[in-house]
Image: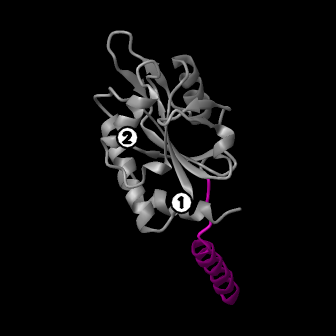
Amino acid sequence: MKKKVLVFGVFMMALVLSACSGGFKADHNYSIEPFDFTNQNNESVALDDLKGEIWLAQFVFTTCTSVCPPMMSNMSELQEKLIEKDIKDYKIVSFSVDPEVDTPEKLGKYLEGFSVPDPSKWEMLTGYTMADINDLAVKSFKMPVIDDPNTDQVVHGSRFGLVNKEGKVVKLYPGYEDVPFDTIVSDMKALSKED
């Protein structure tokens, strides 16, 4: 009986210590295809520029009539929560899935429409083909990008992707509805402490 109690005690202590360590546990380890695109300020932003930083990725477009406005609002709210928790070292990267329409200027105005708390953290990217962005979304984030030939809309994934300092997608979260804000903030805080 004493042996069972001792084993149970050791197991419980290990469980408590692992819960208290606050370490980050990745769900995925997807490599991101190299890219070099243009942001809302007409500046070049490449995957290599983001190495060493934690970033959140999303796929949106300025004429979207469905999931994009809520996703942008959710990402803005998430940024407020990051500021509240004093998390400073991160980027938010929004890839346009309608690059022919979404010029840097349009993306800049689109971002302004959401009154984001700190626009300096946002990279609104364009300057590529539909084939390029479909390739990146599917291979790197396991999300589809499908141009609808009958409308001006694009079908695309609505998840937020968390990317670590090495440029690997480590988690995906709902970005449209039921966004786990506290989990994302907690994950980003834990990930930022890892070297």
Count neighbours of disc 2 (C-alpha within 10 A) and say few if under 14, some if 14 to 19, many if 20 or more.
many
21 or 88, which is in the foreground? 88
Query: Is residue 177 in view?
Result: no
Q: Position of residue 195 (x, y in %)?
A: 71, 62
- State the extent of the magenta-drawn residues as a range: 1-26
Residue 15 is one of the magenta-drawn residues: yes
Locate residue 96 relative to residue 176 in the image: left or right: right
Query: Is residue 76 in view?
Result: yes
The answer to which quarter of the image holds residue 177 is: top left
User: In the rendered image of this protein, does residue 152 appear above or below residue 138?
Assistant: above
User: In the rendered image of this protein, does residue 107 appear above or below residue 24?
Assistant: above
Locate residue 20 relative to residue 176 in the image: left or right: right
User: In the rendered image of this protein, does residue 126 appear above or below residue 24?
Assistant: above
Count neighbours of disc 1 (C-alpha within 10 A) and say few if under 14, some if 14 to 19, many if 20 or more.
some
Disc 1 marks a residue whose amino acid type is Asp
52 or 7, which is in the foreground? 52
Q: Which residue is mark 1?
A: 187
Say which mark, if any, is on residue 82: none
Q: Position of residue 15 (x, y in %)?
A: 61, 74
Of helix, strand and loop, which one carries label 1? helix
58 or 120, which is in the foreground? 120
Q: Residue at x 59, y 70 (%)?
A: 22
Q: Which residue is mark 2?
A: 111
